[in-house]
Amino acid sequence: MKKNILLCFATIALFSHEIYSQSPTATIALWKNDAKGAYTIIHDDYGTSVVDGIWQYADTIAFNRGLKITFGAIAIECETHRNIKGYINPYGYAKNVMIDLHHHEIINHSHTHSCAVNRGWSPCDVTGWGETVGTSEWNTELVNSNNSILTGTGVAPKFYIYPYDQFTDTANSKLQSMGYIGSRTGWSIDGVQRSYPRFGYEANDLGDFYPDDKGFFRTSVQVFDDADGLKNDAGQLSTLNLGVDSAIMYGEWANRELHNVGNSGWGTVRVAPYRNHLNYVKSKVQSGDLWMGTVSEILTYQMQKLKFIPSASYSANSQVTTVNFADSKPEIAVNVADYLAPLTIKTPVTVIVDMAGMSEQWIVMQNNTSITDFTQKNGKLYINVYPHLGPLEIFKISLLSAYESNVLHRNIYPNPTTSVLNIEGDVKLVRILDLQGVEIKRDCKNTIDVSDLQDGVYLLKIDSSPLFQKFVKCAQ
Ligand SMILES: [Zn+2]
């Protein structure tokens, strides 16, 4: 009797320990790849000759460092026939090189660069087009520019830069109806700039980075102005680097507005400090501190981070960790699948799964697809996925390592499989076992129906071989 009680206690203690050590948790990282801060560079006025440094320098300086920039096109300037590295107009170079080859993002910076709204100072001290719905200027600056960019590059822009950063909410509503996910509003409604670290966020929400209730983002910006353009090289570099340092320090997004790269133009950055700045950015990306994306990547990341709450659970029976995504923030009335579907430029989010001390090798599956974009560090998985595509299944495969050390593999496919497993070559007897070595089924063909197996990892034993191979069965 006494012995039984002791045994019972021992079992409970062991069991409790197992529960504790196999309770994984999941979160969505603040920024992609768990970077501390996020960064964008938007070059304004693409198409005008005063910012030809965008295609002469910025394009390749960024690309050569594995970085993506965003550039705002003035549509009528991009349509103008002039030779840009052998292309007939700025659209030609943008489409064939900057977009298709270098994966930079083009956004809409109006058709003629007229003021959108009267803010009381020159040049925007006359009634602006953004204030009057349906006027020819309204249609020109919002709609014609959009259609021009689509025709000229094949890309539908999804973000708008107001000329002189002067905006109206009526124009924002129009942009949203056209499928835009945000605009750069730049200044608060009363024309007062926000304090430095918050420049990258909503003018109407200092505490966080939120869209409106329909999912439209109004983002602010860090302007590199004419005073910055007059600084020496070291001064320009430190001004630009400070934005990056601030984003990393505060865990925020710095959204840098630039114009030309070269020796002339309003707020120009000279080539040497621009190159050195992007060297600095690259070093911060490589150290894991910074994520640099295009503006649509930043906004789609943020939208998914706001709308999904992940939760992880581990099943001791199947040895599968499942990560489910719950809908969050019903006040943002966005269906993420519908929101993302029309966008050509978007990004998955980084889901961090803390495996709670299980230091193993893993296979990650989502919706019958093996996810390869994940890394494993200090007992955590960093998995880049779109949560709206479904739950994650994480399979533990360490139990197989002892079997696998000397295995001469036969080709089995597909692996993972949902229904059928094919075995290369002739077979006499195939046995399928669970990870405890219990036989689940056997067959004598080289095509085996496994659709009736529960999701999980299994062992395959072929003929009289003493060796085992693993395969994964996952949901239909
Ligand atoms: Zn501009």
Image (spheres, rainbow, N blue to C red):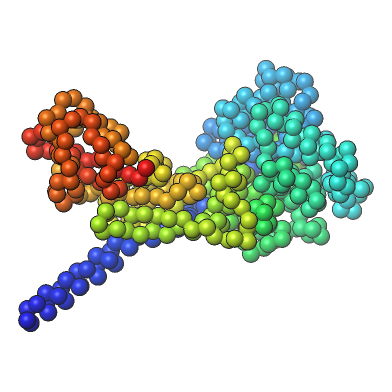
- The answer to whether residue 450 is left or right of residue 108 is left
Is residue 80 left or right of 68 when viewed as pictured?
A: right
Which residue occupies 15% across, 43% down?
403
Q: Nearer the viewer, residue 36 or 301?
A: 301
Instruction: Say if residue 188 shows up in the picture.
Output: yes
Residue 218 percent coordinates (x, y): 70, 52
Q: Position of residue 132 (x, y in %)?
A: 88, 47
Residue 442, given in percent of the width and then of the height, sits at 15, 39
**Which residue shows up at 27% across the image and 53% down it?**
318
Which picture quadrant has residue 6? bottom left
Report the front residue among 336 and 420.
420
Q: Is residue 270 visible?
A: no
Residue at the spot 65% in from the left edge and 32% down from the top edge: 155
The image quadrant that residue 99 belongs to is top right
User: Furthest-top residue in view?
Assistant: 86
Q: Nearer the viewer, residue 170 or 449?
A: 449
135 to the left or right of 150: right
Picture layout, residue 362 above or below residue 275: below
Which image quadrant shows ligand 1? top right
Q: Residue placed at 73% from the left, 45% from the top?
A: 177
Q: Position of residue 376 (x, y in %)?
A: 35, 49
Specify the quadrant that holds the N terminus. Answer: bottom left
Residue sticking out furthest to the right: 126
Q: Quadrant of the C terminus?
A: top left
